[in-house]
Every structure is written in C-alpha cells, then in structure tokens.
Image (tube, rainbow, N blue to C red):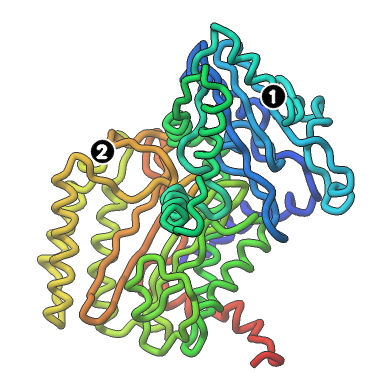
Amino acid sequence: MNRSRLLLISLWFLPLVVCSQEGFSPFTKDFPPEEFAQRRAKVYGAVGTGSLALVQGAPSQPGYIRFRQTNEFYYLCGIESPHAYLLLDGSQRRASLYLPHRNAGRERSEGKVLSAENEDLIKELSGIDAVYGVDLLSEHLARYARSSSIGTLFTPFSPAEGASMSRDLALRAIGDIAADPFDGRPAREGHLIQLLRERFPQFEIRDLTPTLDNLRLIKSPREIALIKKATILSGLALMEAMRSTVPGMMEYELDAAAKYVYYRNGAQGEAYYSLVASGPNAMFGHYNAGKRQMLDGDLVLMDFGPDVGYYMSDLTRTWPVNGKFSQAQRELFSFYIGCYRAVLKAIRPGLTAQAILQEAVKQMEQILASSKFSKPSYEKAARDYVERYQRSAGSPRATLGHWVGMATHDVGYDSGPLRPGMVFTIEPAFRVPEEQINIRFEDLIVITERKAEILSDFVPMDIDEIEKLMREEGLLQRYPRAEMIK
C-alpha cells in the first residue's frame, strides 16, 4: 500500500470535512450560477424556438426523511425546495422557477427553505430569470398555449431519480405498482403528462429525457471533482471494512463501518443500498439483506458508495473473512486480477469498448494458457470467463460497464469512442457456481484528454496488499458492539 499517496488523499480530502462545519446554506456551494446557466442554455438549443421545457421537482418527503431534490431538477438549477417547477422558454431563452409560498412555521422548526418570496436571492444564487408562486404556473402555461408561436412542450417521460435511485430501479418500481391490482396508480411523471394534455391540448407534449441524458453523459470539471470526493470516500470505507472484518462478524457491521466513513466526511446519503455479501450470498448480484454471520473460510464481497453533493461513486472489492487467502482462493484471485488488469490497461480515450475488449482478450488468453488450476471446476469457470469476453469483443455494441454520475447507474447512451468527461466503472464477475464463489472487483474510471484515470487505484487489489491491510486494527475492533444489547 502506498502510504504517502493515501496521506495525500486524506489531506486533499480534508476541506470537505471543514466545509461541512460551516452550517446550513439554502443553496449549493458546489456549482456557481454560471454552470447551471450553461446547462439550461444547452436545453434551449436542444428544444429550439417555439418550444417550452417543463421540469418537475421532487415532492415533500413522507415521514422524517431529509428532503433531497431529484437529479434532473437539481442539474438544471440547484434549487432544493419541494414541489418546485422549472419552465424553460426556448424562444426567449428564459428560465422561470415556480415555488410554494413561504411556510414561516416550518422554517422556524426546520430552517430556511427557498420559497416564492425569495425572488431576488434565488436570482442571485442560481441565475434564474424569474421566480413565481407555484399557483401561477397554470396561468402562465395557459398564456403560452394561446400563443401561436409556442406549439411544443417538452417534459421528462422517464421517472425522476431521487435518493439512492437509478432509472432501472425506478422503472421497476413503476412496473410493480402497475401490476398491483389494488394499487395501479400512475407514475408521477405520467400523471403530470396526462394533466398537461388534458389542460393544454394546444401543446404537442414531447420527451425531454433524451436531451437531459445526453447532457449528463459528459461531466464538467466540477462534476468530476465531486465524483472524485465520492470515490475517495468509497475507497476509504472499503479499506476500513477490510481492516474490521473478522470471522463471526455480521454483514451489517461492515455496512456500519462504511456509513461512519461516509457521514463523518460530509456525504449526504448513500448512492445505493449496501451490498455486503459473504459466502453463498455473493452469488446474488444485488444481495442487500446484510443479515448473515461471516464465517472463517468465507469470502465477502462488498459493493457500496456514497452520495456526495448529488454525485456518486461505485466500488467493489472481495476479500477473505479471516484475512488470509487460502491456496484455492489465491489460485482464483490471481487469474481474475490478471484478467481484470488487462481490461484496465486497455482503456484509453478515443477507443470504442469493442476495441478495448479486443486488446484485453489477447492478454486474457495468454493468462488462461499459463494458469494452472487445482480443480476442473476452476478451469471451466476461467474458460467460461474468457469466452464471455471473447463474445463481447466480437460485438460492435459491446460495453465495458456502466456510467456513473448523478446516479450510480447513470443515464446516457453512447457506443462510440470514449471521450473526455465520460465516467464509468468496470465490474466483471468471476463465478465458480459449484462452490458458490463469486469474485468481483469494481473501479471508477474518468476519461481525460490523454488517458483513462482510475480514481480508485489507491484501494488494495493485489492479494498481498489486501492481507497486509487486514492485519491492521479496524474501526469495529476499536469500537465493539454495545454490551447492553449482546
């Protein structure tokens, strides 16, 4: 482990902790109004003249849950007030924000929330052109509907991404509700679209989702800075989990150690539920119950990341619960790590995923040919692993992993060459089903003008590095379970 690099990371990361002590602020400090204005300008250009774009913010949270804005709404203006709407006029290139009126009693109880009465402050903070009460939105849309120059209204058709949410699971939730014969209520986005069509039939309602997805695919330097912070936190949390792991511990205890690292250093939440999967649980790709006791001889796979200022990370490591790789585990890990590094090494700007995999497969085939396996099932698993990559390398639609940004499984589709500002992970799984073994690593990569920068390369990957780290005392050893509840 490179101690000097880790020290530099810790020192570099310190300002995030300091900033968290400054107290409540009604608007983000992560982006200046100019960046939000640039994003809105790209929407104006995409929808064109004669069109409007309407984006709905998140509603109030049910229960004692801290409010978090949707990714789509925050991306365009940074406002974190519930029940807000953003109306973008493509002809005038003008942004209007619609907010509920001030609730003085709630502010006395919970703190300042930007409202319709804060017009001047909101204009200064976000660069928004006009601020109104949400009660005026229908009237203003009706005025546009009477105009012969405005014929199209864009709004996102895809479900909005909230806390710990990616679009894949948001769509799954909508499907589950629709399949429930005693529920079946429409999605919030679907309900908005239905109301717009009923109340303003003059508009052609079109989908804004592809425009926003394309914009979010390429990250700005400030976005990448937040993703770096989230990745450092994720890596430090994984390392603390490695130190703390001992036989007899519950899976949820590693979840607790990671969350301590996250929240102690300013994360606003989890990017997704923690995946701490020991022994046979690792065979389930999104196992998240965390209720199994980890046993001597088990492997544990941990996949977890924080939400830092609306930006995520996504890292994974697998390690032995007892801190020492068995001979069989070393055999499998050595093969896997060699193939994994072959993919990382091949990633470069300007190459397609297919070209990268074709280069990586050549090295994988050499690793497979030189590897010796103690069991036929291990050799079969290794051959299957390489063959999957060979098939992927033959497809022009091959992918390396998934995008990461405001969502863990971030939006955007692109099968062309890698371009600066793209952020993604690779996470190939190596399975031996006969012994219920699943080895998976995951690292976060940012494409720059010159290279692929692996933001998580400080997290131990090699067998000896992992064992060395696990010999150190962990957080959970220094702070054992409460005696009163044992």
In-front residue for pair 119/135: 135
The location of residue 217, given as percent across then percent down, is 43, 36
Residue under the image location 45 percent in, 26 percent down: 206
Question: Which tag, 1 or 2, sits closer to the chain's start?
Answer: 1
- Mark number displayed over residue 128: 1
The location of residue 376, given as percent across then percent down, is 11, 79
Task: Name the amino acid, label 2.
Answer: Thr
Residue under the image location 51 percent in, 86 percent down: 249
In-front residue for pair 171/342: 171
Left or right, residue 339 beside residue 142: left
For numbered disc 2, what is the local secondary structure?
Answer: loop
In-front residue for pair 21/9: 21
Circles 1, 2 touching at the beta carbon (< 8 Å): no
Task: Name the amino acid, label 1.
Answer: Ile
Q: Quadrant of the C terminus?
A: bottom right
Q: Report how far apart the C-alphas of labels 1 and 2 lie in the structure.
A: 39 Å
Mark 1 residue crowding within 10 angstroms, few (<14) / some (14–19) / many (20+): many
- Say whether residue 455 is visible: no
Residue under the image location 13 percent in, 74 percent down: 379
The location of residue 423, given as percent across then percent down, is 42, 43
- Relative height, residue 185 to residue 471 (above, below): above
Mark 2 residue crowding within 10 angstroms, few (<14) / some (14–19) / many (20+): many
- Mark number displayed over residue 352: 2
